[in-house]
Image: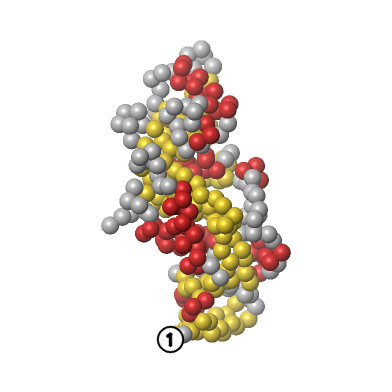
Amino acid sequence: MSSSRNSGRQDLMPKERVVLDSDLRYLDRDRLLRSRAELSVAKMLSFLRQDYEYDANLQLPDGKSMKIDFKVGNRYIEVIDSEADVARFKHVCELLPGLDIIAVGHSKYASKIDEMDSLFFFDSADKMQTGSIFIEDPSLSFDYAHILPLVEKCSVLHGHTSTVMVEIIGSMKNNLVIDFGEAKRIIKDTLNAIDHKFFINKKYLRKEDREHYFVAFDGPKGHFSLQLPKMTTYVLYGEATVENLSSEIIRLLAPKMPANVQALGVYIYEGVNKGAHIIAGVKKD
């Protein structure tokens, strides 16, 4: 778990901060990936239970070889994070016009590769597009308090200010997954529901009345018995870790998303360069 849970001085940290890709480490199946975009692709493939080869060798007609980011069966995915990636993708397509390969990347490179716009997949066979957008803004944050009785240094009441980044994955509709403004409104409304709340595992609930929860538990720091106002308490199924909070935000966001959204990913930063990322499918009844 994040070492920032050991600190009770979160009030000294500014709410607005910049976290660079170069400062982060992206892992999937014990593989160290280079960027958030690559992590998103890896997570989606893992979620779909697709085995993949990372940094796969592709043999070229001139006898040389080239690294392609992902290989799934006989198909390839190149993640476009730079001008060099654009040039490499175009070069491969020119040398191997029949190769089953797609480009995935960001909108800043869309003019360089016709098929690419935001983070999306292009299937030339049926023209179906699946896109992924990211919503990351300093205003997408929430304050909370919690206790983690199973973690010694976090087994006392303490609080955090956490920022949130949300990834929305779905089929393209009118060249959009979802309007950025609408997505940001939905995310803010959801965060407002959990802002300035005390999170606690339901298993510690002993009783309740009309206005209060009564929780009690034993931990490394002794016995706790708390009377909590319901209006400022949020009861969770499970411990109040950033991983579980990411899952809870997905659960709250999913019913508010349009029908074309197929999966959601939520990053919660608990301090700088520390946090959790959960991705889950969205089912519409």
Residue 243 vs residue 18: left or right? left
Left or right: where 186 falls relative to 283: right
Q: Kindly give the residue lying farthest to the left in the view shown.
A: 285
Q: Position of residue 214 (x, y in %)?
A: 50, 84
Q: Which residue is mark 1?
A: 210
Report the residue that reaches farthest toward the top: 62
Residue 82 percent location from the top left of the image: 58, 31
Residue in the image at 59% along x and 60% along y = 162
In the image, residue 44 lies at what x, y percent? 43, 44
Residue 148 visible in rendering: no
Q: Residue at x 61, y 46 (%)?
A: 25
Other-residue count near label 1 (Cα within 10 Å), few / some / many at <14 / 14–19 / ≥20:
few
**Rendering quarter of residue 255:** bottom left
Q: Amino acid at mark 1?
A: Arg
Q: Secondary structure at mark 1?
A: loop
- At a point 48% along the width and 82% down the height, the residue shown is 213
Q: Residue 53's spot in the image, x, y percent?
A: 48, 35
Q: Nearer the viewer, residue 265 or 43?
A: 265
Quick check: 155 above or below 178? below
**Quadrant in which the C terminus is drawn:** bottom left
Q: Is residue 32 above or below residue 69?
A: below
